[in-house]
Image (cartoon, rainbow, N blue to C red):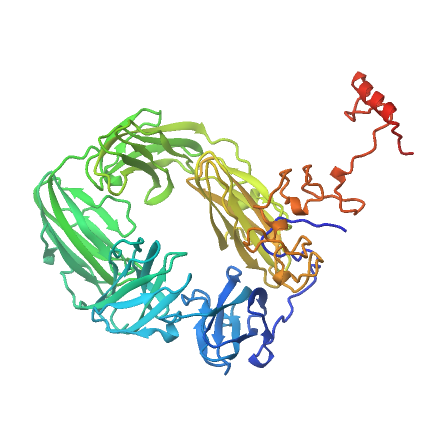
Amino acid sequence: MNTRYVIILIGSLAGFSSSAVAVDDHGDTCAAATAIATDGTAVGVIVDPAAEEDWLSFSAVAGHRYEATTFDPSTSFYFEAAVRGPDCTTTLVDWSYGSPDEHSVVPTTTGTYYVRVASLSGSYVGYLGLGMTDRGAVVDDHSGSRASATSILPDGSTHAGTTDYVGDIDWFSFVGTAQHLYELEIRAMSGTGFYGVGAGFYQMGSSVGSTAWSFSVPGGPPGDWVSVRYYVPAAAGGTMHVRVYSYPGSTDEYEMRVTDLGAAGSDDHGDTCATATAVATDGSVTSVIVDPDTDLDWLSLPGVAGHRYEFTTFFASGAFQGVVQLIDTDCTTPLAEWGISSANELSFFAASTATYNLKVASSGAPLVGQFALGITDRGAQTDDHGGMQSGATAAPTDGTVQNGTIDYEGDYDYFAFSATADHLYSVQVRALAHTESWTVATELFNGPTLIEFSNGSDGGPGGPGPWDGLAYSAASSGTYHVLVYAGASDSGGSYELTITDLGPTPADDHGDDSGSATPLLTDGTPVGGVLGHGGDHDWFQFTTEPQRVYAVEIRALTSPDSGLVGGSLYAPDGVTQLGFAGWSSGGETFDGDWTRVLYYVPAGAEGTYYVDAGGLSFTSGNYQVRVLLGIGLPGDFDGDGIPDAGDNCPTVPNPNQADFDEDGIGDCCDSDSPDADGDGIANTCDNCPTAYNPTQVDTDQDGIGDTCEAAPTCCRGDFNQDGRFDALDIQDIVDALLAGDTCPP
């Protein structure tokens, strides 16, 4: 038997010739639908050409929950997928690209149901792996789809609910009025286990804002109410939805309510500095509505020299992308700027006793919404380093220790240094001894862009913490900024910071762009790499066939420092990003999991594709990347009698489908399976389990790898097979004589 081995998570079709084309793999109408099992067996669906429809059917029992336990589309494939009733017309649940509906359906009658898969707008081609599992009779208090959401009133009434099973989503709906502000609140109730719950507003199928998590513990009180607000733009009233979801793996009870906070759509503040609305500095909350998107709202506040003014309330409705600027007394000069993702400290010091101004405007989609601002005068305070990039302390890059103090809760300290292109810089920080335990960490910025971060150093009564930091290779010369901050609840503490120019960036093991990319095979062979410094990117390339599905997979390996590695797939132009495999986390004592992205190569789009491996806070980060020709046409690649679609190890014969850890990956293909010789092939399928032989070469096809089939004792005097005939061969000659060994002709 010629054993072919590839370390993979999905099937391979390398045995098919490149001239093969995608077939019409399923019926194009409800009447011609392909029947599928509900035992979780995965079925591949290819939509190509874009005008094609593929229909599947399954037998359902009333009241049972049918879950899509495999739902894996290729990237850049924008599709429509819907579960339809026995009439082939009524949509029960929407699983289209980006749909927030739960991947389950509970039919109300026994019969045949259908899944229709098609290209969105008839413009895309691609692949969808789908496996349905009958979870049996289930009780669900609220529907998992928007189409059958529970209707409520936005009057602040509390609604009780339960996430009844892992993955359960509950939908509610209400009618929203244009230019009204709505608040969504939710909390986890005390139950039998650790429980987390969150909720979000949806309008026209899109998320427009979500709450934080509310958590509860067994026997404890209910979790805190967490909330989010949403401002309904002018002419955008109508049905709105609330989506309730639980923390992964947890199920229990919750309470939820929606409150209409009333009309808020008028031009609520002056549009110029001269007509600014005066606000207090006692923490009172001022509501600011930006609608239409060209609206400017101005506020003014009295400032006292040397006093610190803190935004004790600062949040926007939903996902509103607004910006707040601090404008000097001249009504023109901007002094600071804050957005929802701004890295500036939410405080400012008044340089003089005068009237300051705040200008609120839209900065990006969504373009209208509400800001809630509350400003508190914290009185005369001192701060040893500025909390904004504009006030950063200049620091040398020779390793000189910079001393600093977190002077109050929420204090940021900024440092600036001049970098030389292609030089490697080390930023290290440590928390010093303190009366209470506390943490300090750093972030590195290039302008407003966060490019690296450290894990943190813990100091306290026991003394200073260890040095912790990051290394980064500057792509270009210029000024970089280091932000030093403490834990969210840490009120203060002293620290030391060093910035060191380590000289030219060390040699790189893989090219930094598509022009110098390292070739990859498409048989799943992993290639290792090292992200040798912050900002390092490693590029790889592979050759594709048309109308095939490829998987790009990457994982972080044990490394000197913990961090993340991810892989992006790029088109043959080396510029267009097609998809992202996700982040894999590695650390000092553990490997990360494989993450992947699938891509279906359309007809005529074959060629060289690229993979960009990059890290986040992963200095000296080790990783592996691999590409494999995946599922795409029906077949049994490994010849073990199990069709690829249902084979848990589709490239290595394993007719018993053994899966010890029940993770859906057969032992022969599972990276977690025992591998005594460390060659990447599990013991159960290794044709030479005690000797390293990743190629699994078996010339005589007897099931025993050539490496394990010892060659006869060598003649011509070189008995120890070291390439020389010398005194070291004497003992082997004596042993051969005593054993009566013979040589082949």
Q: Image check: 406 left or right of 35?
A: left
Q: Can residue 547 be spotted in the picture? A: no
At horizontal 38% and vertical 75% (from top left) the residue drawn is: 147
Q: Quadrant of residue 444?
A: top left
Task: Tell me the quarter of the image containing the C terminus.
Answer: top right
Q: Nearer the viewer, residue 325 or 718?
A: 718
At horizontal 57% and vertical 79% (from top left) the residue drawn is: 29
Q: Nearer the viewer, residue 717 or 317?
A: 717
Q: Image check: 22 left or right of 405?
A: right
Q: Can residue 296 be spotted in the picture? A: yes
Residue 733 at x, y percent in the picture = 84, 22
| Vertical order, 364 against 102 (above or below) | above
Tell which residue pokes out farthest to the bottom in this image: 87
Residue 155 at x, y percent in the picture = 20, 71
Tell which residue pokes out farthest to the right in this image: 745
At horizontal 55% and vertical 58% (from top left) the residue drawn is: 599
Q: Image check: 38 left or right of 368?
A: right
Q: Quadrant of residue 238?
A: bottom left
Number of numbered discs on residues:
0
Q: Image check: 568 left or right of 347?
A: right
Residue 545 at x, y percent in the picture = 64, 57
Residue 55 at x, y percent in the picture = 56, 74
